[in-house]
Image (tube, rainbow, N blue to C red):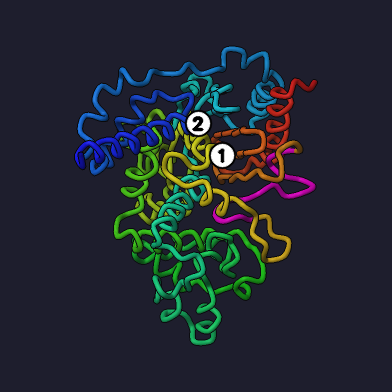
Amino acid sequence: MLRRKKQKQASTVAGRRRYRIKRASPFLDYARVLANYYKVHPHLLAARGLLQNLERQFGAVCPAFDSQERQFARAFFLIREAIAQRSFPGAALAVTHRGALVVSQGFGRFNYDENSPEVQRETIFDLASVSKALATTTMAMLLYERDHLPLDEPLLQALPEFVTLAPKHQQEARQAVTIRMLLAHSSGLPAYEKLFEFATTREDLIRAALTTPLRSVPGTRADYSDIGFILLGELLARKAAIPLDIFMRREIFAPLGMMRTCFNPALELKGQIPPTEDDRRFRKRVIQGEVNDENAYVMGGVAGHAGVFAPATDVARFAECMLHGGAPILRPETVKLFTRREPSPAGTSRALGWDTPSRPESSSGRWFSSLAFGHLGFTGTSLWLDPGRRLSVTLLTNRTWPDRSSQLIRELRPQVHDAIVEGIDGRS
């Protein structure tokens, strides 16, 4: 009797888990996602026989982008025109709407050479700071759910060096910095420092970040900070007692079926990734298949602020997870907490690890709702999601090729987002 009761409970739990995965990934190959999820969660195999014959349980759902050229003609025109104007050599666009992948398209080439490879819809890009939201913030959400990451815990409890190594006159102020402040970019740390100019190892660079002076009183203003997310990445790795890349692969990328998402792409993949820069100052070579950010490069390519590589379709898989309340890896209440705009500092547009639309101008354009959240990346990448519309837009480019000088993508992003919403709504 007791045995039958346990079997029934196990079956119910497994059924709910399959439903959550299916609900989160409506345009994915469920069998592959499920098999991969349970491969990295072997303790869930205790219910004997529940996960056999996955291929028969779920089939692949066809993407719904057959009419994308017609429906999103304006958005496609804008991207192709931007390539013609040398805003960037290549791009990949993925759009999900109401659980369907309605756009999946590559544009242009790897560089401006007419003989260079064409960008495909599955081409892998350097996500740059989109890594902060997709990877680092998601890891923070997971640790928060497991009671390993109290958001208002002072940073010094996990990173005591942040205070002890600082100049005496800053130690008192630094004691007030919390994990929440790092996520909300209100810690008082500067936006960016060229730590790579004097730090030659990962340990040297982390120490340099730990001793970077505050630029403002913690909690009083929001200033986007790479330094803060470098420290957040180190803090998360210590809390999890496992390197960032391993945790993220096991707990985020694999369960969501993001099969081509990674840090430090394998050598054989590098020729399949668009170059981001002809670096003549620091590394003195073409940067292709390795992280563009110099601080992340010194850290071995794995950092809290940058380093993830992925195709647009994988980012869209992640977006669908977030639009479905975090299933199957997060709870809805956690997603709401982290994607809701912070009440302070006054005037901030920041959520926890995410940004929200700023008015009157936002890179998300005019039509995304007040519920929207997103993030940009230096290499010309972006991800915006609108739960109100059940919409996500992933735009990946290599706008930094060849010398980081082009800023035209700033004008393009809102135009593309507007054109996509108008294509969905049937507006002219």
Magenta range is 350-365
The reply to whether residue 371 is in sight is yes
Position of 380 with respect to 59 (left or right) is right
* Nearer to the camera, 99 or 86: 99
Q: Quadrant of the N terminus?
A: top left
Residue extending furthest toward the bottom: 168
Position of 20 with respect to 220 (left or right) is left
Residue that badge 1 annotates: 381
* Image spot of residue 13 (x, y percent): 34, 38
**What residue is drawn where x is 40% and y is 71%?**
159
**What residue is drawn where x is 73% and y is 61%?**
347
* Residue 364 shown in magenta: yes
Residue 63, above or below 96? above
- The residue type indicated by label 1 comes to Thr
Residue 171, above or below 246? below
Q: Look at the numbered discs 2 and 1 and tell me whether their residues touch, using CB distance below 8 Å.
A: no
Spatial CA span between label 2 and label 1: 10 Å
* Image spot of residue 130 (x, y percent): 52, 45
- The residue type indicated by label 2 comes to Ala
